[in-house]
Image: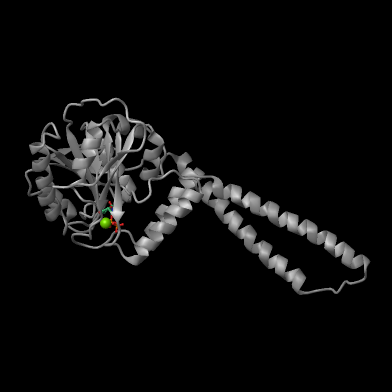
């Protein structure tokens, strides 16, 4: 079997020989009943591979977070027909992908935890490379999409623009990395210290730091079912990424304000000269154009400031990031928790 090259992107420490870790895979699921049987088969194969390679120290745990599904996903989790050690966490309602994933990560108690989508677009074989990087000292290993041939042109185009915009805004992200990653216990414990209510995990994990590595994989087509990320959710996540990690938009408004104020200042001089030399023609255009233009600029500026004020409003409430309705581990039902 072949897997993609591994790159340690920060100074690697002296090779540490770590004991084979216990591993959990966390999968957020929103209406994924169709794909779960395929996911089980694929992960059973991965578990067998990893045990054979002695890459993991024991059976692999699978944590499935049901994010307010309206189909029979929860029933499929409760009655999981698989040899894997499945823990099901059912959230009280649809909290969104990032929050569901976070709930699963906080529940996992393994030495290394891999997060993955339910639809098998993330290549499970890349986990072999991730574990190798972990063994070489990485605390976080990012799965990076080597090719997006299987994505729609719109998804490819919007993703490219999105990463370009975020980097202009000064947000530190790994390009073409979504939420397919391995985190060590140390990195997860650090992640749990971040208190924000609004979660943009791929940005937060960069803030955690530690030695990291990337593993490249080919992104496959969704194995079954439909995308749970319509355009409005993608835009919401994109805005989340910018407003959570960058105040540059606010600074751009200030700069724009300065630029317009300078132009208005020059224009004042011009008007005075024009008046002195008797060239004044009371103009309608020169009156209304600035009114419309400045009205637009003001509204944009207010909107951007409003985004941040809204964020402050949400964060100050300190609401729980997820609420668990119930948990099953091999049939046992545990008490609800929230965090
Ligand atoms: N998901 C979730 N809650 C949501 C939306 C999505 O838990 O509100 C899960 C979904 O079940 C999947 C992952 O997030 O495991 C990624 O979603 P999807 O594959 O539909 O996104 P896409 O690959 O189309 O961007
Ligand atoms: Mg998908």
Above or below: residue 6 compared with residue 93: above
Can the viewer see residue 323 in this picture? no
Above or below: residue 33 compared with residue 167: below
Can the viewer see residue 220 in this picture? yes
Rendered image coloring scheme: one colour
Q: Front-most of 126 and 101?
A: 126
Q: Quadrant of residue 208?
A: top left
Q: Front-most of 299 and 334?
A: 299
Q: Front-most of 10 and 260?
A: 10
- Ligand 1, by image quadrant, is bottom left
On the image, the x and y values in percent for residue 317 come to 45, 41
Count numbered badges in the picture.
0
On the image, the x and y values in percent for residue 177 come to 33, 48
Quarter holding the C terminus is top left
Residue drawn at x 18%, y 61% is 224
Residue drawn at x 7%, y 38% is 52
On the image, the x and y values in percent for residue 290 come to 72, 66
Above or below: residue 119 compared with residue 251: below
Q: Front-most of 314 and 108?
A: 108
Residue drawn at x 10%, y 42% is 49
Above or below: residue 109 compared with residue 150: above
On the image, the x and y values in percent for residue 319 come to 40, 41
Residue 196 left/right relative to 150: right
Q: Quadrant of residue 50?
A: top left
Residue drawn at x 39%, y 62% is 157
């Amino acid at each position: 079997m072949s897997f993609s090259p591994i790159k340690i992107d920060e100074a690697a420490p002296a090779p540490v020989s770590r004991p084979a870790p216990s591993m959990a895979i966390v999968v957020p699921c929103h209406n994924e009943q169709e794909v779960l049987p395929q996911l089980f088969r694929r992960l059973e194969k991965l578990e067998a591979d990893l045990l054979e390679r002695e890459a993991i120290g024991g059976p692999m745990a699978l944590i499935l977070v049901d994010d307010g599904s309206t189909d029979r996903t929860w029933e499929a989790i409760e009655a999981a027909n698989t040899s894997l050690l499945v823990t099901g966490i059912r959230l009280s309602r649809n909290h969104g992908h990032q929050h569901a994933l976070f709930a699963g990560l906080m529940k996992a108690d393994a030495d290394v935890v891999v997060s993955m989508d339910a639809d098998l677009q993330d290549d499970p074989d890349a986990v072999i490379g991730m574990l190798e990087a972990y063994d070489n000292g990485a605390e976080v290993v990012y799965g990076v999409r080597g090719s997006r041939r299987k994505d729609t042109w719109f998804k490819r185009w919007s993703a490219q623009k999105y990463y370009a915009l975020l980097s202009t805004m000064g947000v530190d992200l790994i390009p073409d990395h979504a939420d397919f990653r391995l985190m060590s216990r140390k990195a997860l414990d650090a992640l749990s210290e971040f208190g924000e209510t609004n979660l943009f995990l791929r940005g937060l994990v960069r803030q955690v730091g530690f030695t990291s590595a990337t593993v490249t994989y080919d992104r496959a087509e969704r194995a079954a079912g439909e995308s749970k990320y319509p355009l409005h959710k993608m835009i919401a996540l994109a805005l989340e990424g910018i407003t959570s990690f960058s105040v540059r938009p606010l600074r751009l408004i200030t700069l724009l304000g300065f630029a317009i104020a300078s132009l208005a200042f020059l224009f004042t001089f011009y008007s005075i000269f024009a008046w002195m030399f008797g060239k004044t023609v009371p103009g309608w255009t020169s009156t209304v154009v600035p009114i419309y233009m400045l009205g637009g600029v003001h509204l944009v500026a207010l909107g951007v400031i409003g985004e941040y004020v809204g964020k402050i409003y949400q964060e100050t409430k300190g609401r729980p990031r997820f609420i668990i309705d119930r948990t099953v581990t091999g049939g046992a039902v545990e008490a609800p928790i929230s965090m």
